[in-house]
Amino acid sequence: MTTDTHQGGGWLLLLLLSILLLSACGPAPAPTEQPTLATATPVPPPTGRGAGGRLRLVYFQAPTLLNPHLAGNVKDIEASRIVYEPLASFDENGELIPLLAAEIPSRENGGVAADGRSVTWTLRAGVQWGDGQPFTADDVVFTYAYITNPDVPAAFTGIYSNIAAVEALDPTTVQITFTEPTPSWWLPFVGTSGMILPRHRFADYAGANAMDAPANIQAIGTGPYLVNSLQPQEVLFLANDLVRTNRILYDVNPYYRVPDQPYFAQVELRGGGTAGVAARAVLEEGIADFAWNVQLDPDEIDALEGLGKGAVLTSFESRIHFLQLNLTDPNAGSSPDTPHPILSDQRVRQAIAYAINRKAITTDVYGRLGLPEEHYLISPANFRSAQTFYPYDLTRAQQLLDDAGWRDTDGDGIRERNGVRLQLTYQVPVNPQYQQVQTAIARALRSIGMDVEIVLRDPNVFFGDPTLRGSWTRFQADIAAAGWLSTSPDPQPHMGYWTCAEIPTEANGWSTYNISRYCNPQYDALLAQAALELDENRRRDLFIQMNDLLVEDVAMIVVAQLARAAAVNNTLEGVRLTPWDADTWNIQEWQRSPTP
């Protein structure tokens, strides 16, 4: 099975590269005469809106839904962020900067109430949507109603759960009133979870029909670009899955509020394939300007950078690679009412945690792009726990399985209990790093007597429509690889994913993020307390307690901290990676550098 997968990956690489090359290449330019002068006068690069031609982006996962509040994955949020904006966001230095807001609220300017129960945002005047309609406070009020409507399968409802009301005081003033004193007033409508939707385009699709809205694809926002088209491309066969590719073309928003931005007239985003295809398009073939999330073998990255056509930008932040452990029975629909017959036993989960050699895996798979890690809450640094829980220890892992009653009584190397084999299904999306980690962990688990079935999923299905059986949130397996990224320097939304209320179910469209189906009233109580705690030190201690509870209970198993990595062509300037927003957050500032 492993051999076939590698052969399929090589075939896909050649095929996708040919697709990209064919799309990028046109007729050969006509020969031009050489200048007769000894020196030519330098020609300055063009400036101003739309002066830079086409910007070419490559994503190894294909975005399919351009509504950030229905998107259950990073790829769709990245593609949506090119179009939509929040009121504000955090830059690479953790500074809150205004976008649709005219200024950042504070106690000094009267925006933040002294009792912590409300915040008032002043919006920029004169902002227009990409179709010329005015952006007003009513759009913010509508976005809140949309996200919190129980009939809408919105992905970020937890961030808005402590709001009593969102009101438009006038066309450029919005007041948010909280149910209790709230220290994290900056969470709603900030960053990727706070993008504002145009009321006039979504009003008729703000309920059970939300997934049917034409605007989910034909996206028009206040950002620098609007969507021209989203076109499915080739459907390719990889391993046991079909891999879908697509092409999204964006045009300049003619009403964008900054006169000289964006620099590029069009953005072309090609999605689907592998991280290797995406990286080579930028660093080897030179047919793309930017490749997202290029988690590759470290030696391969060094070799590609050595070609001199581009570089990989990295930023260590809050991104982690971890394992989701299904605490419910996947054969019964992964319902909270059906505990997992094996993994509901904490001793089994602990055995898995002890069997994983994080240091070896991180060194072999990620190199300079990874660090061994066991904690979930790792950024900002002052929230990091000092506790150590599950160091690599195969002897301890085996003893825990013995204590749980799992023993190899027939000598075939696999443990059983009451006639049932200790067998688990471990799924990952097709991705070189995910598959290498999967292979290493499966080998370790087999060494302690677990039978592990390896399953590969098309990334576009795995991270796509949550209602599909192969999706990550639907979780029709026992173990799943996961990549996770906190999108705010405040831990509350990041930690809020693990409450009982955030368990994905059929009733909520499988759209929430407590994918392990972990439910612990003690954890929920700590989060509720932190949400109201105004003392910074006590609040930090509460979040550290939550992290320690998740790790000790083995709600998940963190393997590595990962660098954010993007391949950037040498001629592209202005890319600034921030831990707290999409890579495309400042795409309006990207420019083509002058060529020699």
Image: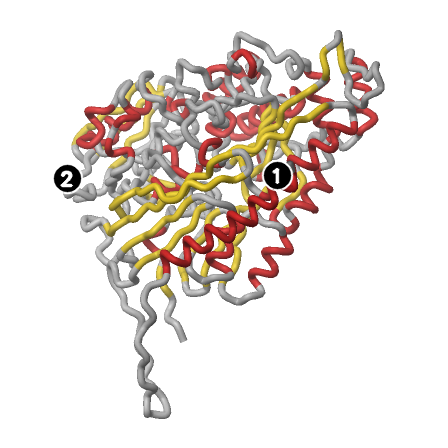
Residue 70 visible in the displayed image: yes
Query: Relative to 302, is 317 above or below?
Result: above
Q: In this view, does 124 lie to the left or right of 521?
A: left
Residue 125 visible in the displayed image: no
Amino acid bearing label 1: Gln
* Distance from Cα at disc 2 to Cα at disc 1: 47 Å
The residue singled out by tag 1 in the image is 435
Residue 1 position by quadrant: top right
Q: Quadrant of the C terminus?
A: bottom left
For the residues bearing labels 2 and 1, Cβ distance under 8 angstroms: no
Residue located 46% across and 19% down the image: 504
Q: In this view, does 291 lie to the left or right of 394?
A: left
Residue 105 position by quadrant: top left
Q: How crowded is mark 1: few (under 14 residues within 10 Å), some or many (20 or more)?
A: many
Q: Nearer the viewer, residue 593 or 247?
A: 247
Amino acid bearing label 2: Gln
Upstream in the sequence, badge 2 or badge 1?
A: 2
Nearer the observer: mark 2 or 1; the answer is 1
Residue located 53% across and 56% down the image: 312
The residue singled out by tag 2 in the image is 133
Q: Which of 205 and 259 is in front in this view?
A: 205
Q: Residues within 10 Å of mark 2 (few under 14, many from 20)?
A: few
Question: Whole-percent x and y of residue 370?
Answer: 63, 45
Q: Is mark 1 on a helix, strand or loop?
A: helix
Query: Relative to 306, is 422 above or below?
Result: above
